[in-house]
Image (spheres, rainbow, N blue to C red):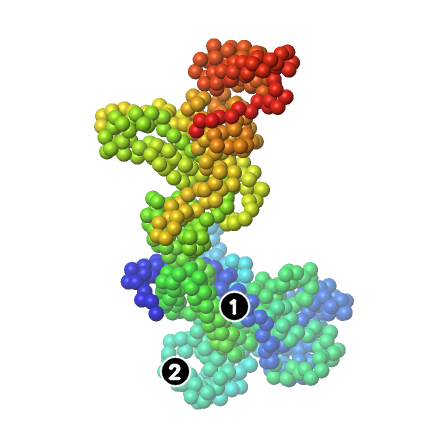
Amino acid sequence: MPTIPKITIYKSVILSILVIFVGISVQLFTATTSVEERVGLDTLFKLRGALPPPAEVAIVAIDKVASSHYGFSNEPLSWSRDYHARVIKKLNKAGARVIAFDIFFKQARDKNHDLVMATAIKQAGNVVLFAKLRRELLNISGQTPKTLSAENIFSIETIHAPLALFKESALAVAPFTLPKFPAKVTRFWTFRSTSGDTPTIPLVTLHYYLQADLNAYLQKTLPALATRIPLTAQAKQLREGLSTNDKKYVQLKNLIYSQNKTALVNLLSAYIENPQPYLNFYGPPRTIKTLTYDQVLENNLPAGFSFKNKAVFIGFSEKLEPEQKDNFHTVFSQANGLDLSGIEIAATAFSNLLHNSTIKPLSMQSTFLIVIGFGFIIAVVSRMFREIVALGLWLILSATYLYIAFYQFTEHTLWLPIFVPLLIQAPLALVLGISWYALDSYRARKKLHQAFSYYVPETMVDLLTEQKQPIQHSQTLQYGICMATDAEQYTQLAESLSPNDLAELMNQYYETLFSIVRKNNGVVSDIIGDAMLALWLPFVNQTSSVNPEIQNNLESRIQACLTAIEIVKKHNKKYTINNHTLTLPTRIGLHAGEMMVGNVGAVDHYEYRAVGDVVNTTNRIEGLNKYFSTYLLASEEVITKTEQFLTRNIGNFILAGKHNAITLYEIIQLKANASDTELQKVERFHQALALFRHGQFKEAEIAFVDICKMNPTDGVARFYLQQSKQQRTIAADGKLTGENLTNKDWNGTITIDKK
């Protein structure tokens, strides 16, 4: 197994420190926000899905169906209270252990019906009624302040009990409000601290549900508390005593723990632990067993169902979204807009407390330990190994952590953080780790690349390194553009300068040329003395035929022409050598076609070359610059469709050693920069050339004479002037006159014998 370099280990540790720092920072920043709830907790609930409904609890609901059945509007307060009385009697007769209403009976209604309901509540002896909490602002004197800007204003909550007739008959009255921040319900209160630690409906209902068992232990440790005192008062005393670790209450706790009474242990936990626990939802609306008023009153219960020993919650619960009244947005809210009702959440809270199954987030210390540990491991793995291995291990670690979090959530209702480890630290570690590794690899390849690129074109280095093919097999058939250059006056300079000065001059000269070629995506293939060969190639792996789309690569031809124009413009660039200022005007030839490109050689010596007739023809075209006193000539294969350049067609030629004619153009400059005078000169030349091609040598001679008078330095015009005279002499010797002055095989093509 290869040894991991120390520098890699050091970099992995540095990355882990960074990832841990970011994780802790984000955790601290989001500790007071609901980000983890909205992301982490929701994810765990959705992965877990719905749970089987708790057997100890049931809901009796008022909904649209029941309201329509009895002719009431779909509002709980519109119902006649004798129906509530009938439901209480039915439930009491069926053996319900405790009944909790989430309906606020605020005002008196029909006197007889109110009395019937109060009597039913009294006779049942196990009914908990809903009390409303109201927030009030008071000053130091206990009065409502006249202005909100007054000092010493206090906000207090007061309990507004239901109708006195009902309150006196009920087992207890208790509030049930839900924290809705920012808009989703995730928690509930067991004790409302802002109203004097008032126990809420779920806690009071649970307390009475287990009171028979609890009183047996209270008789042994706190007999005074086991006497007939109000249920809410008993609950508040238990919370106070257990929270302060009063000796008698500690004895009660130890006794219950020693007897392993799970339900009572869970009840004590509800008194001792956080009074605002997280809800452990069982599923979407109607997951908890729900029956409507008409089902209960008309004995239309499901087969095998019984209310015996159940805690029954009564309130509004709708299964039709438009009819919702008392609804709350939760993680199990439906796509159609249906939310859980308040009574379903109350029943959920009761069952959570009974089974001690509320969701338990980790302590801040434990959370930080996870952030540190996970951050360290995921960062080290992401940085230490190469990309594909790091990605594989990263996926395994992330999936493993998610599975552990899911398992703890499902089996132990333990909430491990998701947002920071999986959505902050893991992506950060992966991106930075792989990027850092890639950057190091890139730097190493760049050094190697740079070393090779001094001898082989960069594109070829890339081709060799990416394809990993042997150097002997690195030749490919390409369609490309070839540029040949030649420095004017090089021979004289080589003779007059010392070898050191000449070498310095050529280094400066080639620095100019190479930078222009590379800027325009060309490749320098070869240099010999003052001559450079540059290529524009697609570098695709083709061994037999060339894709026509590549042959028509207009962009490469334009880049080659732009490069040539820019090089020619450097005519007057000054090169300072040993306090002498020198210039090296450059002549250029351009041609395009198929060529074999790659490493040419044998045994242990190879050189990067382009081989083919295109290369030879390009050099011939470049050589014609001397013949015509021009600086930039290109074949028709290069110029075709490059409409942005001002060019002049200088004719068809059979070059030295060739059999096929080639059409050549002189590239003057970009059309956008051309003057009217230049355009006119080109047009006059084309007219004169047309006369020459049609064998009208006398007229051509006159036209070329005019061009030479206007521009004595036009070498191409001088050449055609001489050719016109020469063709007239040939025609005269052949005794051709009038329209038959030219030979019938004449097509205007000129053979060049000189190289």
Determine which of the numbered discs, if any, sits on residue 250 in the image: 2
Nearer to me, 290 or 464: 464
Q: Is residue 679 left or right of residue 738?
A: left
Q: Position of residue 301 (x, y in %)?
A: 71, 79
Contact between labelled residues 2 and 1, with CB atoms less than 8 Å apart = no
Nearer to me, 215 or 81: 215
Residue 302 drawn above or below residue 110:
below
Nearer to me, 489 or 416: 489
Q: Residue at x 60, y 63 (%)?
A: 333
Residue 509 drawn above or below residue 253:
above
Q: Amino acid at mark 2?
A: Val
Q: Is residue 296 left or right of residue 609?
A: right
Q: Would you say residue 109 is visible in this rendering? A: no
Mark sitting earlier along the chain (1/2): 1
Q: Residue at x 68, y 82 (%)?
A: 305
Q: CA distance from mark 1 to mark 2?
A: 36 Å
Q: Quick one: SS at disc 1?
A: helix
Determine which of the numbered discs, if any, sits on residue 44 in the image: 1
Q: Residue at x 55, y 32 (%)?
A: 660
Q: Position of residue 637 (x, y in %)?
A: 54, 33
Q: Would you say residue 265 is visible in this rendering? A: yes
Quadrant containing the C terminus in the rendered view: top left
Q: Residue at x 29, y 26 (%)?
A: 493
Q: Residues within 10 Å of mark 1 (few under 14, many from 20)?
A: many
Q: Is residue 234 left or right of residue 28?
A: right
Q: Amino acid at mark 1?
A: Leu
Q: Quick one: SS at disc 2?
A: helix
Q: Position of residue 499 (x, y in %)?
A: 24, 33
Determine which of the numbered discs, if any, sits on residue 194 in the image: none
Task: Say how many tags the image has.
Answer: 2
